[in-house]
Amino acid sequence: MLWLVLEWYGATSEVPWLFLLAAWILALVVAAAAYAWWNRAGLWLQLAVRGNVPASGSPAEDLPESVLRSAPQMAPVFEGDALELEVALHTRGSSRGPAWVEGQLNGRRVEFGAGLVPKKGWRRMKIVSELRRGPVGATGWRVSTSDPLGFFTGRRPYADSEVALVFPRFTSLAMRREPHELQASLAAPRAGSGNELFGIREYRPGDSLRRIHWRSSARHGELVVREYEPPGVQTLAIFVDPAPSSLEIADQIARIAASEAWDCIREGGRVVISASGGEPSASPRDLWSQLEWLARYPANSSPRSWEVAAKPPEGLLVLITAAPNADLVEVADRVWVVGDAAIDTDVPFERVGLQWPL
């Protein structure tokens, strides 16, 4: 518009230098447009997690170095921790700018601006604290560019992505479980040797009447007793509530399941975690596979039905739920109940709230 005005004044006033000024302005506008296009075409965004800041009580502070080295992420992040996100702009061939970066990380807005992006790139660190369990999503990210005079601006959007996965907290529950199992054994002496329940069997002469599993006996029409196997390497099947009523309950279920898995795997055992309607966890001897499954729970389960995979032939079935299912409670060897749901069973179980640690 300024160029057109100067051209008009030059033609009506017959002042020659106005035509020269108009030509300079037109050349400046064309150069600014070309620079803005070149600037936008040569920049791209990169988001990467470069480190973590463990919070008090984080498993990252207590895990052995050999376990941390096998983590799928360079710096494994647990709920409550903070992560260091690197926001970087890279350039092709030469320095460019100006540019602005904006987007959301787990719903938190992040904005940066750079007047100049040098050849070696531009980087800024963003600390994201108090993370919750689950994927850390980068959504709505875009790079805005302009020419130095601000005549032309452009925006390049980037697809939503997952920059990190926050694992549930966990701890060893072995010491907590032993007193509970001891109390259960005093109330109902066990058949067999050891303290790991692997099933029930028919009643044999000489078995104590206090070993009888009365509910199963009524269902089978004959007396049956609990039987325990000697201590040793075990296979642990963990079944979690497929439809927790809140994220807080789901978080607590995930923490307990992760703790059970950790106790088993560090003793050389195998773990499979599942929920109704979803794929079970992979790599039974790999802790991180179990933690990744639990980090995505309950999105990887279906609330349609309570169906559990078959109990391992020589292992334990641990049920962790907020709404106990009578049939599953009956076949479970160990039951965790999160919340105040009513439960009627003689299977050893423990009721917990939402506090962590327990």
Image (cartoon, rainbow, N blue to C red):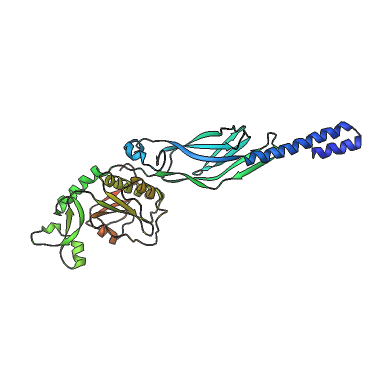
Depth check: give the residue in front, 108 or 147: 147
Answer yes or no: is residue 128 visible: no
Residue found 39% across the figure and 59% down from its top:
303
The image position of residue 265, as x and y in percent, is 28, 46
Examine the rendered structure and indicate whether residue 267 appears above or below residue 348: above
Examine the rendered structure and indicate whether residue 357 appears above or below residue 120: below
The image position of residue 158, as x and y in percent, is 56, 46
Residue found 36% across the figure and 45% down from its top:
288
Examine the rendered structure and indicate whether residue 122 appears above or below residue 135: above
Depth check: give the residue in front, 97 or 81: 97
Answer yes or no: is residue 166 visible: yes
Depth check: give the residue in front, 131 or 67: 67
Residue 198 picture quarter: bottom left
Viewed as shown, does residue 236 lie left or right of 221? Answer: right
Viewed as shown, does residue 201 lie left or right of 247? Answer: left
Residue 276 picture quarter: bottom left
Which quadrant would the N terminus be assigned to in this image?
Answer: top right
